[in-house]
């Protein structure tokens, strides 16, 4: 069960890094440059790196979804990525922060905590269904008072 969540964390980190590369690219390009100047410059290199990181993100996210419900994985990816991006934007790019943003981030963290609690409950329920042999059918039969082999 852990590997899909590790893949999800890698995916959200790649997604956040891609967004930050695009922001850095935009900061380097300025507003007066032509499209060609933006593409064939350090700005364009950062944009290309961002696109590559987005592609890697999609690959890792796809494999994470083999073991994570999308109703859980997507909020974790978006929320976790948002927190990473916002932290870097504020502390590295010098973007402003307001009390409204702080409240929003706190609500986001609270939401991620509730999602984590849901994941924990799912893991406990799955473990409770497991028979010592690893056979869930035997565990259900045992709990119903029947022998799984009969």
Image: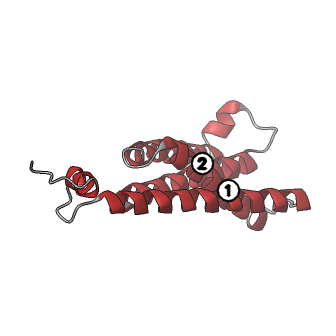
- Which quadrant holds residue 36? top right
The one nearer the camera, 46 or 10, is 10
Instruction: Identify whether 40 is placed above or below 143.
Output: above
Q: How is the image coloured?
A: secondary structure
Q: Residue furthest front?
A: 145
- Report the disc number at residue 75: 2
Image coordinates of residue 105 in percent, x first then y, are 76, 59
**Image point (25%, 53%), residue name:** 136
Q: CA distance from mark 2 to mark 1?
A: 9 Å
Instruction: Identify whether 106 is placed above or below 50.
Output: below
**Image point (78%, 63%), residue name:** 90
Q: Residue furthest right?
A: 99
The one nearer the camera, 12 or 49, is 12
| 133 lies left or right of 126 | left
- Which quadrant holds residue 118? bottom right
**Image point (20%, 54%), residue name:** 138
Marks 2 & 1, CB-CB < 8 Å contact: yes
The one nearer the camera, 77 or 124, is 124
* Circle 1 crowding by C-alpha within 10 Å: few under 14, some 14–19, many from 20: some
Instruction: Identify whether 4 is placed above or below 38.
Output: below
**Image point (49%, 58%), residue name:** 119
- Report the disc number at residue 111: 1
The one nearer the camera, 125 or 7, is 125
């Amino acid at each position: 069960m852990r590997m899909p969540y590790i893949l999800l964390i890698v995916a959200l980190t790649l997604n956040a890094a891609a967004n930050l590369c695009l922001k850095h690219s935009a900061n380097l390009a300025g507003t007066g440059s032509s499209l060609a100047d933006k593409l064939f410059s350090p700005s364009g290199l950062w944009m290309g790196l961002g696109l590559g990181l987005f592609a890697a993100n999609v690959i890792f996210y796809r494999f994470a979804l083999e073991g994570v419900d999308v109703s859980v994985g997507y909020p974790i990816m978006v929320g976790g990525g948002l927190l990473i991006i916002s932290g870097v934007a504020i502390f590295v790019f010098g973007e402003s922060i307001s009390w409204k943003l702080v409240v929003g981030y706190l609500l986001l963290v609270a939401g991620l905590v509730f999602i984590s609690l849901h994941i924990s409950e799912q893991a406990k329920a799955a473990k409770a269904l497991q028979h010592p042999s690893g056979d869930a059918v035997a565990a259900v039969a045992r709990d119903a008072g029947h022998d799984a082999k009969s």
